[in-house]
Image (cartoon, rainbow, N blue to C red):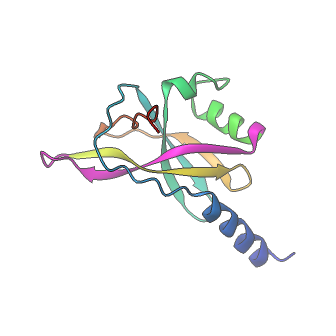
Amino acid sequence: MSTRSNRLLLGIALAGLILESLVSHPALATDKVSLFKVITAKDEIIIGINDDQLSTFEAKNAGGVAKHLVQKGTLTAWQYAVRKAEAGALEQAPLRQVGLMSTEALRVEPYTTPLKIVPLPDQTGQ
């Protein structure tokens, strides 16, 4: 299979995993969220993983996230993006849930931001 076909196939597979679950209200959860940058050959995204999920990984760092992704093959996480808060300040907030595939991710690294990080939404009522 050609490189172009592989990229197209992987792109379609990744697009199929993206779960469009937009956040419509401020998050009520108080969990601490760690941000990571996931770099692929095509692009990069910022994901947020709360302490509860991160504690299930071998290590609570980028290496632990990468290892978990390789071992399990996929990982569901919240994609984070910059938005304006009601008061007008910029903040990092959950945008949508995404599915990551280990075949797409080339590197996972910690992501630091000077902005406030909004916690993940409470999904216990869903």
Q: Give the x, y percent position of residue 99.
A: 61, 51
- Residue lying farthest to the right in this orientation: 1
Relative to 123, residue 16 above or below: below
Q: What residue is rendered at 60% in x and 44% in y?
A: 76
Of 58 and 87, nearer the camera is 87
* Quadrant of the image occupied by residue 55: top right
Of 84 and 29, nearer the camera is 29
Question: Which region of the structure is painted magenta?
Answer: 71-89
- Magenta segment: does it hold 103? no
- Residue lying farthest to the left in this orientation: 87
Q: What residue is rendered at 66% in x and 68% in y?
A: 11
Q: Give the x, y percent position of residue 111.
A: 45, 40
Q: Is residue 32 visible?
A: yes
Q: Give the x, y percent position of residue 19.
A: 54, 55
Q: Is residue 112 left or right of residue 105?
A: left
State which quarter of the image contains the N terminus. Answer: bottom right
Q: Is residue 41 visible?
A: no
- Magenta segment: does it hold 88? yes
Q: Is residue 94 left or right of residue 90?
A: right
